[in-house]
Amino acid sequence: MINAFGKEPGLPQERFWTAGKKVSGVIVVIYVMAALFLLGPADAAETIMVCALPLLMIWMPEVMGHYTGWGVIHGRPITRQSLPGLVWILGWVTLLLPAALLLFTMSLL
């Protein structure tokens, strides 16, 4: 049922596929294809697993930022929520770090 504003109630009004999500998805596909053709299927699968967390941080920073509970640093729990903007930035840094390191090492040759 459509309301007076021409939108269905209860559904998210913002678009899921933003430009940042599309670009990050393309970067992951490039990483996976490069690993598949240069290193093999096992390394391509590992690349998918490594890219999953940064991709989640970019695609769903609110969800990842609100996480509290079991922590990975010294086995201590996470007691405070993180800012979604900070999670998003850290996701981009983590996703782009391999490409930046590759470009840096190639420039040294």
Image (cartoon, grey):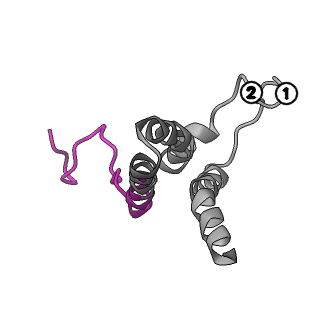
Judge left or right: residue 5 versus residue 98.
Answer: left
| For residue 82, above or below residue 101 | above
- Crowding at dot 1, Cα within 10 Å, few <14 / some 14-19 / many 20+, comes out as few
Hey, what amino acid is under mark 2? Gly
Residue beneath the point at 70% across and 38% down: 81
Read off the residue under disc 1: 74
Residue beneath the point at 66% across and 71% down: 104
Residue 88: x %, y % from top left: 59, 53
Residue at the far left in the pictured view: 1
Hey, what amino acid is under mark 1? His
Tag 2's secondary structure?
loop
- Magenta region: which residues? 1-26
Assign the N terminus to one quadrant of the image.
top left
The image quadrant of residue 78 is top right
Residue 72: x %, y % from top left: 75, 29
Residue beneath the point at 44% across and 58% down: 27
Residue 25 within the segment the image draws in magenta: yes
Residue 23 vs residue 103, the one in the foreground: 103
Tag 1's secondary structure?
loop
Residue 40: x %, y % from top left: 43, 42
Question: Which of the two marks, 2 or 1, is nearer to us in this view?
Answer: 1
Read off the residue under disc 2: 71
Residue 56 vs residue 50, the one in the foreground: 50
- Crowding at dot 2, Cα within 10 Å, few <14 / some 14-19 / many 20+, comes out as few
Q: Are marks 2 and 1 in contact (CB under 8 Å)?
A: yes
Residue 53: x %, y % from top left: 56, 40
